[in-house]
Image: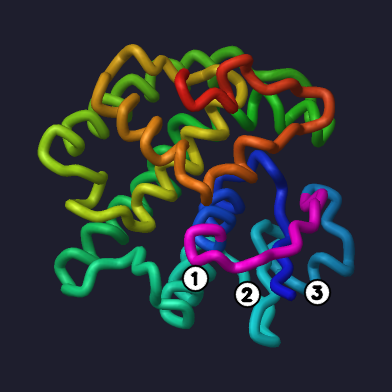
């Protein structure tokens, strides 16, 4: 049995979950309070971060390393293009969402409004929240620009870039922090990816003490 130590509202864990589900791999989800930094968890990943995946007798960490391991060991359905230049574009966009988008948006909204309370780190920082609300507009516009030229974010086919973006946006959508009316192309893209079977477990997530937005699990949002 594949085991994933995760936190439900971690976009990095969600990216791995989507990859596993798209590959039709059964996985046991184990909720991990990573902020408690238990000695047992630190033995699995000295960095003290989720996700951590146990698969094929290995203990793997870092969401990008995990996703590429899954892609290389379970190649179908493919989530990476065949040519080096197209794979480079997928990796660029994965890094965009996991680094820039995460730093400017996810960490400023989801982490401030939900994670801080869960981890008892105090109240949301109003300045961070305002900056996140402002920054997401730029990112949605950038995604819209990409989707004006492509069927999916990185090209004609669904890739890890789409799962990275959807993982972050789904966390934000949980707390109703995405203006889906800002860009029709982005809304259509999310509706398309949200309706995939791989997304079902994501839409079933409930974080104790924080109810999802009313439209969160609605495919006709």
Residue topped by disc 2: 60
User: In the image, residue 49 lies at what x, y percent?
Assistant: 68, 58
Q: Residue at x 24, y 26 (%)?
A: 185
For marks 2 and 3 on the same chain, the one whose residue lies earlier in the sequence: 3
Which quadrant would residue 151 be assigned to in this image? top left
Q: Is residue 126 left or right of residue 34?
A: left
**Image label count:** 3
The answer to whether one can see residue 109 in this image is: no
* Marker disc for residue 43: 3
Residue topped by disc 1: 65
Residues at circles 2 and 1 in contact by the CB criterion of under 8 Å: yes
Q: Residue at x 79, y 57 (%)?
A: 30
The answer to whether one can see residue 122 in this image is: yes
For marks 1 and 3 on the same chain, the one whose residue lies earlier in the sequence: 3
Count neighbours of disc 1 (C-alpha within 10 A) and say few if under 14, some if 14 to 19, many if 20 or more. few
> What stretch of residues is rendered in magenta?
21-34
């Amino acid at each position: 049995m594949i085991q994933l130590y995760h936190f439900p509202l971690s976009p990095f864990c969600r990216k791995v979950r989507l990859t596993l589900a798209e590959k039709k791999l059964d996985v046991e989800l184990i909720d991990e309070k990573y902020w408690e930094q238990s000695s047992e968890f630190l033995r699995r990943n000295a960095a003290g971060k989720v996700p951590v995946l146990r698969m094929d007798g290995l203990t793997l960490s870092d969401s990008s390393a995990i996703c590429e391991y899954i892609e290389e060991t379970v190649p179908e359905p493919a989530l990476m293009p065949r040519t080096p230049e197209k794979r480079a574009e997928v990796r660029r966009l994965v890094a965009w969402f996991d680094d820039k988008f995460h730093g400017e948006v996810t960490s400023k909204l989801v982490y401030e409004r939900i994670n801080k309370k869960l981890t008892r780190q105090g109240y949301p920082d109003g300045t961070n929240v305002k900056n996140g609300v402002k920054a997401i507009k730029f990112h949605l516009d950038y995604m819209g620009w990409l989707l004006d030229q492509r069927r999916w974010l990185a090209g004609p086919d669904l890739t890890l870039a789409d799962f990275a973006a959807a993982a972050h946006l789904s966390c934000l959508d949980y707390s109703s922090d995405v203006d889906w009316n800002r860009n029709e192309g982005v809304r259509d893209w999310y509706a398309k990816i949200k309706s995939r079977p791989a997304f079902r477990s994501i839409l079933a997530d409930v974080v104790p003490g924080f109810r999802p937005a009313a439209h969160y699990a609605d495919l006709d949002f």
